Amino acid sequence: MASVQGKLTDLDASYDKQDYATVLAGAPAILAEAKDLASAAAAKKAEIIKSLKDEWTGLEASLPPLVASVKTRVDALSKQKRVAKSVDLAAAKSSLADATALWDKAQAAYMAGKVEDAVPGAKTRRPRPRALRRH
């Protein structure tokens, strides 16, 4: 990109100097390079999207069971009459709600065809609440 921009700047300078022969000689080559940039960018984007879709497949397989296990643990702690002082059940519930909301948002983005938004959204990490840490 920088190379094409540099050549275009040089071509623009030649035009300003009214050196039209240089402009006419150089313009087709610069135009071809610019078109190649567009093709290269499209190919790179396709490569990135494929990689993100592959990553999404892994996230889709691992995150729902993980969230379900955290929910099971939080539910079990919620049913106890007394919870250890080291357990912050409110924080655990809040973190679980946040994680569930982030996952739902990531799934919606993926279903809308926005895989470039879905994968980072699904990978957003939240601190693990104390209620879920093993002592």
Image: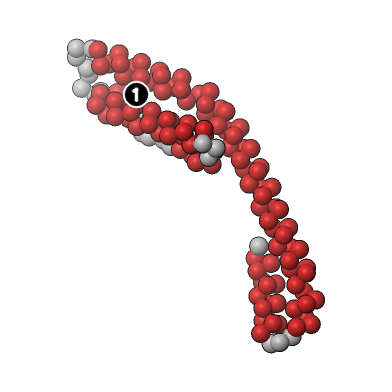
Colour scheme in the image?
Answer: secondary structure
Q: Secondary structure at mark 1?
A: loop
Any part of residue 119 in sight:
no
Quadrant of the drawing holding the N terminus:
bottom right
> Looking at the rendering, which quadrant does residue 84 occupy?
top left
> Looking at the rendering, which quadrant does residue 90 occupy?
top left
Instruction: State left or right for residue 77 relative to residue 103.
Output: left
Q: Residue at x 73, y 58 (%)?
A: 36
Is 34 or 89 nearer to us in this picture? 34
User: Residue 16: where, in percent of width, then height?
Assistant: 66, 85
Could you tell me the amino acid type at mark 1? Answer: Arg
Instruction: State left or right for residue 46 relative to residue 103.
Output: right
Q: Residue at x 23, y 12 (%)?
A: 80
Q: Residue at x 34, y 23 (%)?
A: 133
Any part of residue 23 in sight:
yes
Is 54 or 88 nearer to us in this picture? 54
Looking at the image, residue 19 lies above or below residue 4: below
Instruction: State left or right for residue 47 relative to residue 110.
Output: right
Instruction: State left or right for residue 7 relative to residue 64.
Output: right
Looking at the image, residue 118 lies above or below residue 60: below
Residue at image mark 1: 133
Give the residue at the far bottom of this rendering: 17
User: Residue 95: where, in percent of width, then height?
Assistant: 32, 30
